[in-house]
Amino acid sequence: MGVHSRLSPSAAKQILNCTPSLTTGERFKDEESPYAAEGSAGHALAEYLVKRYLKIRTRRPTSDYYTEELVEAVEEYVAYVIEQIEEAKKMCKYPILTVEQRVDLSIYVEGCFGTADMVIVTDTKVHIIDLKLGKGVEVSAEGNYQLMIYALGVVATVEMLFEIETVELTIVQPRLCNFSTWEMSVADLKRWAEEEFVPKAKMALAGEGEFHAGDWCRFCKARFQCRERAQEYLKIAQMEFKDPPLLTDEEMAEVLLKTDGLKKWVEEVYTYAQSEAANNHREWPGFKLVEGRANRKYTDEEKVVEAAKSAGYTDVFKQTLIGITEMERLMGKKQFNEILGGLIYKPQGKVTLVPESDKREPINLATASDDFAE
């Protein structure tokens, strides 16, 4: 097993926003989820494919996670990386191209290091490209702490050879069709390191600072039992409403903003508590483990068919058309579009209320009403 940095760049958003979460989270053991394992497998394949393009000898990885859909996502990332490599060669005679590059940040924070998926260095620019295989939350490159930290380490390594002026940070998230790119000057990057990264990182390593809940709690190992996070979500139940007895529009909006996060938090706490009780024999006051409801199942489907037919029941099978996504995987995108493209349509989505921060365009209610009427 490889050595891990205490202050991992991949957890920088959480750690820099809530400095005590680093030492608090260290009380909990590391557990790799299936999503993380799939992500590791995808990154290994991406590394192999990019190195093969660069004519670097390496062995092709194997994994049970390599579905057609995952491989397609990885190939989309690799195509983007190759495009950026060729652009760099046009701009610089001898660009530096490194895959899965270990980036050392010890000149800023003792013992801090990480691994950048792809680093491209030209005469005046450092480009950090990061592959995200998640399908849940869209990740932005703008102000992305993880990529900014990688850029700091790379700049420190190459600035004796090149006069680096800017860093370009890119997130490639193929499964969400998300290609996010952001640039900043090296001067601004170093200023951020001096004013924010280094002071907060040192506080985190010392277990100092105040707890602060936010969307960065999502991957914190202490998230299930964190008191600050619990208090943040429970504020919604402690709202003090004044007369009149009906909520104002502003109060309703406050409830709506917190509802989704509150629901997810409750689900996470329940899942954690149930796992601890079932796997570690932990007892929670007022709760017990019981056997859940289960549906009946056939012990042997072939014998069931034989017995039913012997008794005169022949109509024992159902046949349904496979779903569009499965059909597309079966045929491949090109064949799918050629054969079935004219037979596919996308119905209008259900009208949904979301926060203003959502990137989707707002609908025109008058137009929407007319469309539904048709």
Image (cartoon, rainbow, N blue to C red):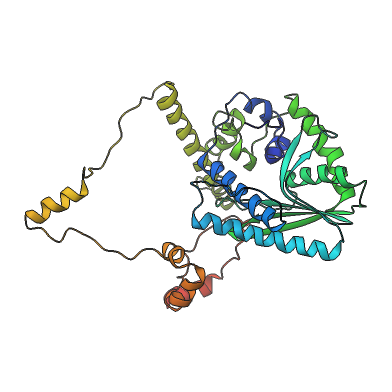
How many marks do you count on the picture? 0
Q: Residue at x 89, y 52 (%)?
A: 164
Q: Residue at x 60, y 63 (%)?
A: 360
The location of residue 72, given as percent across then percent down, is: 55, 59
Residue 87, placed above or below residue 269: below
Instruction: State which quadrant residue 320 falls in.
Output: bottom left
Q: Residue at x 91, y 51 (%)?
A: 162
Residue 49, placed above or below residue 106: below
- Give the residue at the far left of this rendering: 311
Q: 359 or 310: which is nearer to us?
A: 310
Q: Is residue 302 visible?
A: yes
Residue 277, placed above or below residue 320: above
- Give the residue at the far front of this rendering: 57
The location of residue 351, given as percent across then percent down, is: 49, 63
> What is the quadrant of the N terminus in the image?
top right
The location of residue 365, given as percent across then percent down, is: 53, 70
> What is the quadrant of the C terminus in the image?
bottom left
> Does 143 sit left or right of 310 as displayed?
right
Q: 168 or 258: which is nearer to us?
A: 168
Q: Is residue 244 visible?
A: no
Q: Residue at x 23, y 61 (%)?
A: 318
Instruction: State which quadrant residue 316 falls in.
Output: bottom left
> Does 175 sit left or right of 332 as displayed?
right
The location of residue 227, given as percent across then percent down, is: 59, 28
